[in-house]
Amino acid sequence: MSQSDLTMGTHLSVPERSSPFAMPSKKLAMWLFLIADAATFATCLVAYGFLRNGSLNWPTPFKFFPTVVNTMVMTFILVTSSLTMALGVRAAKMGDQDAAYRWTMLTAAGGSIFVLLHVHEWMDLIDEGVRLSRNPWGNALFGASFFTITGLHLIHVMAGIVVLIVVGLRCRGGRCDAGDVEITGLYWHFVNLVWMFVVPLVYLLNVSK
Amino acid sequence: MVLTNRQDDRGAPYGGNPGKYLLVYFGILVLAGLQFAIAYQQVNVTAALFRMFALAILEAGLMVVFFMRLGAENRPFVTWIAIVTLLVLTIMQSSWPDSYRMERDAPPNDRSPGYRTGPSQ
């Protein structure tokens, strides 16, 4: 028996160690990622708050229609997609792959509508003259901070949609991994949770009364 | 260490029921609606921000506990997550006092020698 055989044999005979916190390693990794991502978003929001608080001419351009109404619809869609995601995870955990596929795809559809509404809103603002370095209303940093925060969130939603479609299609093909659906759900709920903080700070504090 | 797919079968037992999810869903919608209502109250920005953020924290709590099922995870993990997250988010709040500096038109450190304090004459 060669040295490599001995080494390999030793390697394979090592008993499986229990994962930290007695949870699947993929799930733990997702939670760690979410903590890091929470710090990223919190940094952006605190920086935004700092700028807004420290500026004497921060614009408050958002009218009830269309911006605030659009934000209401986007919020409704995201919260509803969280419900469909939770039901998808439940179905996957219970072994109902067809239901898991349906709920996951419904969640992806909700996310897609959110993206379309968001892009439409961006286009409206760009038409009104809002750019990264200037805007017609006041502090020049308004556009940069608005597009950075909502853009970062939008990228997260788009990434989530791609993952949801991939995971959903695996369920349709009978290769559904309940653990994958669950960690995708964790990510999706987190993205929606972040939106609950983006809305007040970036939109609702800037409504024109 | 040999990792196997069996790890996917461990973790919190699954007991989510649709009725509870619906309750949480409507609860979050109501809280989100209140945020929009506060935006049109005649209060100053700071008061509005605190009220909206209080509601956002409640919404986030509902989402984390019920939809993300943190409430069903084991206690050491929940404690660890809570400590790490709160620590990071709390430290970030240290910059707020400085954001009022421009409002007062004062330099970063009012008492630094060589700096004139207060509004320029």
Image (cartoon, coloured by chain):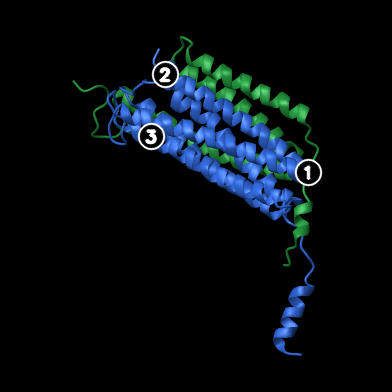
Chain colours: A blue, B green
User: Can you see residue B95?
Assistant: no
Corner quadrant of residue A51: top left
Q: CA distance from mark 3 to mark 2?
A: 16 Å
Q: CA distance from mark 1 to mark 2?
A: 45 Å
User: Can you see residue A88?
Assistant: yes
Q: Chain of mark 3?
A: A
Position of A19 compared to A201: left or right?
right
Tell me whether circle 1 and circle 2 mark residues in contact (CB < 8 Å).
no
Mark 3 = which residue? A145
Count neighbours of disc 2 (C-alpha within 10 A) and say few if under 14, some if 14 to 19, many if 20 or more: some
At label 1, which amino acid type do we have?
A: Asp
Q: Residue furthest left?
A: B121
Q: Give me the residue at 72% from left, 50% from top.
A: A179
- Looking at the image, residue B78 lies above or below residue A19: above
Corner quadrant of residue A38: top right
The dot on residue A207 is 2
Q: Is label 2 in a helix, a strand or a loop?
A: loop
